[in-house]
Image (cartoon, helix red, strand yellow):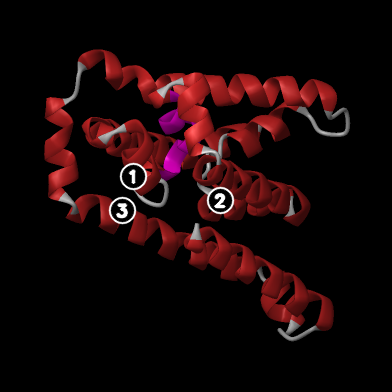
Amino acid sequence: MKGSLVIVSFFIAGVLAGLYGWIPSGVITDSKVSYYVLCGLMFFVGLSVGSDTKTLDSFRSLNPRLMLLPVITIVGTLAGSAVVSIVLKQRSLAECLAVGSGLGYYSLSSIFITGYKGAELGTIALLSNIARELITLLFAPFIVRYFGKLALISSGGATTMDTTLPVIVRYSGQNLLIVSIYHGFLVDFSVPWLVVLFCSL
């Protein structure tokens, strides 16, 4: 929860900086800056995954049926995004699928979408994916009660191996810790591929 509020605070600070010209316009309009930031972000994501050998080793103990949970999360999210595109007439199916493909990974997906589709859709992606994480954190007891323990993991999307993990362990149980980490790992990995795919359509 605290991490999400920090991200939102930085977003608001960025909006204010853009409105009042606190940062030179050349830095903002130069697409190379966001590209280098993205490269650095991808490096640290890879570094965190590669350095955590316990996470990689723990995947071997997973129940084979639970290994399908990330696929179900991705398919369900994309199906929901497709339904939203019917309501939002001003947005194409590909744009809605691109935003949905963020799967809660707001920092990475919003940078990709901004680069491909512009700042407006990138901002929508940022806010919708932050909202996904906040809903998971704030409504965890209700999600588990009415939809089940695995639903809470699906709700967290890409965040289930980091920011929403403590909440998932608390309400879904310690026995689903490995499932949550595995789910977050695979969903996390799928985000850049899916976002780029739908942004390219």
Residue 8 placement (x, y as % from top left) = 62, 63
195 vs 97: above or below: below
Residue 60 placement (x, y as % from top left) = 12, 28
* Region rendered in magenta: 151-159
Amino acid marked by disc 2: Tyr
Nearest to N terminus: mark 3 or mark 1 = 3
The residue under the point 35% across, 32% down is: 172
Residue 25 placement (x, y as % from top left) = 76, 80
Q: Nearer the viewer, residue 164 or 15?
A: 164
Q: Nearer the viewer, mark 2 or mark 3?
A: 2
Q: Is residue 174 magenta?
A: no
Label for residue 46? 3
Would you say 61 lies left or right of 186 here? left
Name the magenta segment's main secondary structure. Answer: helix
Q: Secondary structure at mark 1?
A: helix
Would you say 82 lies left or right of 67 here? right
**Which residue, as the protein is rendered here, is positioned at the far top?**
65
Give the residue at mark 2.
106
Q: Please say if the residues under marks 3 and 1 sit with CB atoms less than 8 Å apart.
A: no
